[in-house]
Amino acid sequence: MISLLKDLNPAQREAVVNTEGPFLILAGAGSGKTRVITYRIAYLIDACGVKPEQIVAITFTNKAADEMKSRVQRLLGKRNVNPWISTFHSLCVHILRSRIGELGLTYNRNFAIYDEQDQLRLVKECLRELNLDEKLFSPRSILSRISRLKNSLASLEELPSPADDYRSQVVEQVFQLYQRRLLELNALDFDDLILRAVELFNRSASAREHYQELYRYCLVDEFQDTNRPQYLLIRHLAGKRKNLCVVGDEDQSIYRWRGADLGNILDFQKDFPRATLIKLEQNYRSTQNILKAAGAVVKHNIHRIGKTLWTENLAGEKVLFYQSLDSIEEASFVLAQIVSLGSLYKTHQIALLYRTNAQSRLFEEVLARQGIPYIIVGGMRFYERKEVKDILAYLSFLINPRDEISLKRIINVPPRGIGEKTIGKLEERAAQEKLSLWEVIAKRREGLSLTTKGETALERFVKLIKDLRQKAAALSASSLIKLVMDASGYLTYLKGEGDERAADRIENLMELINSAREYEEATGEGSVTSFLSRTSLTSDEDSYQEGRGVVLMTLHCAKGLEFPVVFLVGLEEGLFPHIRSMGSEEELEEERRLCYVGMTRAAQLLFLSYAIRRSAYGGRPRTSEPSRFLTEIPPELLNILERGKVFNPQKEPSVQPTEAYSSESIKEFFARHNIPFPTSSGEGAPNGKRPYRLGEEVYHPKFGKGVIIDIEGEGEETKLTVSFLRVGRKKLIARYAQLKKVNDSF
DNA sequence: GTCGGGCGATTTTTT
DNA sequence: ATCGCCCGAC
Ligand SMILES: Nc1ncnc2c1ncn2[C@@H]1O[C@H](COP(=O)(O)OP(=O)(O)OP(=O)(O)O)[C@@H](O)[C@H]1O
């Protein structure tokens, strides 16, 4: 334990050895906040004799939780020690599965957890019931407003203050019905998990005292991104002991869009007036250049407290910047650069970060083609795939007969002749007689003038469900999944489709069985409910194993992680900052913080790239200007790579930056590996002098370096649109503009 | 009444 | 790529 403390600086040590009472640690990126949490846990167990199960640590993502678990494990050696380390949501599910009865509502422990798909179905159902037109009130936006409303609430017992405009009134109306339905369906959405846990602690002294007694030490990472209900939960857990340690960085607050509230930091200081405030100012992660560049970007935020952050690390390379003509070239550059870094870095030391999940596709393709191992974190989630969701919906409905959303999802999947009309009649009766849909289906279908076909189909469906339900009790999740797939005819149905798409789906279902089996083996937990919890709470199949390859993920996912090499791609206005976040200064500042988070993930090398043209899903390519964040980095911190060249870190870059690249061009690289290189369409003036080409790099005495993105007219009349790195897009007349061609590397 | 094909609109970020 | 919607086939 003495050796533990050697790895800490004095400020960190203070935060670790003072184990009693409230602590607030505010500090910049890479200053060792997470290290404080992990060491504090280890110290509590090792030096203070605290029982591991008396400690609860909360992180923001499952990845972060896993990471923290293994770090703690490592600090404590081989001893098998299990403090509770999880996300807010997992913790709440854990609490609610054993105590939800004490809410005094009609919930029971087999409650379903609704993901966004389920939520949308429910919102649509509510809209229909309220005779509101989906066209006028998009379910998506209603849902997001409901979520915002809920996350601003102290608890679900509290009614929102009445709104004055019509739309807000509609939202509140839908919200009320939506919550009532969730209760009827014995289901909770993600927000409810927190809110109902808070409500449980408000209402049940016994539950509250139980957990306060159990969790004597409470630690929270990424505190800046907690929302109101999460803060209230923490406050409950801290109880009278107030052994609460929270760490955060307001510059890394990137979840305000889902209700994260910096006010929590102020409230913490109000609610725990004797809290010790600790600031950490030394960054241990990044090179000076990376840190300076990231700091320069985030300084452009006006609504910011500001803080000191310095490092003893080397200056390192400048931030490397590559400007490509289109997204394909960007992917090619990244691929070539990763290959050329191959001698210095292992693939798993490299991360590829982007703003939106959709951007991963191209990179996946080039990496796969080249045989470079990679893993994708998040994105198209396994448990959200249609076929997987379908089977999980069967499970959910078997376990929780009130789960009508799942029932309606699977009642005619595979198609068994129970169509819209039939379901309509059943629902009508359910509403009239105040029965659940399933009760009507199972017991009260007479006299509904159903077709013979519908009637027999229902008869068989009822038999199927009753049969499955009877067997379910004795089966593990994996066996039940297998049984459901066979008995429901789902597998046969997919096999009948016969195309490769269906083959993929079958494979995914086999993988589902597998993941259930692995879960059972890893946890010794056979219950279907607990497997269903897991599928709702964790996004990835256990695909995220360290050391498996280049890590591809969104910037949001990367929070809290660190990599020797980071590629931050798609730095274009409209993409990053994202067009939908450019509406207000607040949103823009959040995008900027996201950029700061991304840049500060890098320890040694940071590559930024940008594509002039990019085609969105199927549509025509759009041209865009470089992200404003690029222009916010002081030029002297940037090393602008020439098109077609990769950076070669073996040469000494800080002396002569322009000579720092390898002479192997990307083109040669592709030729060597026999990959067709994406070409840009050549256009330009035919007469006399060498014409300008689209995508060509030029230099303007006033505007600096830029790339030609459009050419109009011919000869003397040629007009060029040039995207300049520093000043953005300009239209120039070729004859007058004193443009110099920079080079012709392709 | 049900089902499947074709068509158009639509996707930020996550638990 | 996927979902909702519309239309024609059974
Ligand atoms: N006192 C220290 N001595 C040496 N290395 C340290 C020290 N404190 C932290 N580090 C290292 O610095 C890096 C960043 O630490 P950590 O992830 O805990 O920072 P953080 O503040 O949580 O970062 P962020 O907010 O950016 O996620 C890690 O690699 C960690 O091992």
Image (cartoon, coloured by chain):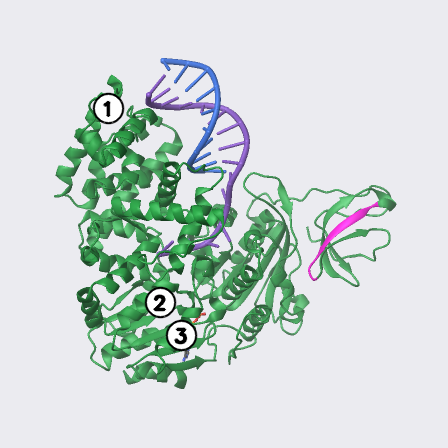
Chain colours: A green, B purple, C blue
Q: Nearer the viewer, residue A356 or A655?
A: A356
Near mark 1 (Cα within 10 A), the count class, few <14, some 14-19 or many ≥20, is some
Evaluate if marks 2 and 3 touch, with contact meaning CB atoms under 8 Å apart.
Answer: no
**Residue type indicated by callout 2:** Tyr
| In the displayed structure image, the side of residue A90 where residue A12 appears, left or right | right
Near mark 3 (Cα within 10 A), the count class, few <14, some 14-19 or many ≥20, is many
Q: Are marks 1 and 3 on the same chain?
A: yes
Q: Earlier in the sequence, mark 2 or mark 3?
A: 3
Span shown in magenta: A718-726
User: Tag on residue A457?
Assistant: 1
User: Tag on residue A231?
Assistant: 2
| Mark 1 element type | helix
| In the displayed structure image, the side of residue A721 where residue A320 appears, left or right | left
Q: Residue at x 44, y 80 (%)?
A: A279
Q: Nearer the viewer, residue A85 or A156?
A: A156
Closer to the eye: label 2 or 3 = 2
Q: Quadrant of residue A457?
A: top left
Q: Quadrant of residue A572?
A: bottom right
Residue A22 included in the magenta stretch of the image: no
Q: Earlier in the sequence, mark 1 or mark 2?
A: 2
Q: Chain of mark 1?
A: A
Q: Nearer the viewer, residue A397 or A633?
A: A397
| Mark 2 element type | helix
The spot of residue A545 in percent (x, y) is 35, 57
Q: Earlier in the sequence, mark 1 or mark 3?
A: 3
The spot of residue A319 in percent (x, y) is 59, 67
Q: Which residue is mark 3?
A: A33
The spot of residue A264 in percent (x, y) is 40, 70
Near mark 2 (Cα within 10 A), the count class, few <14, some 14-19 or many ≥20, is many
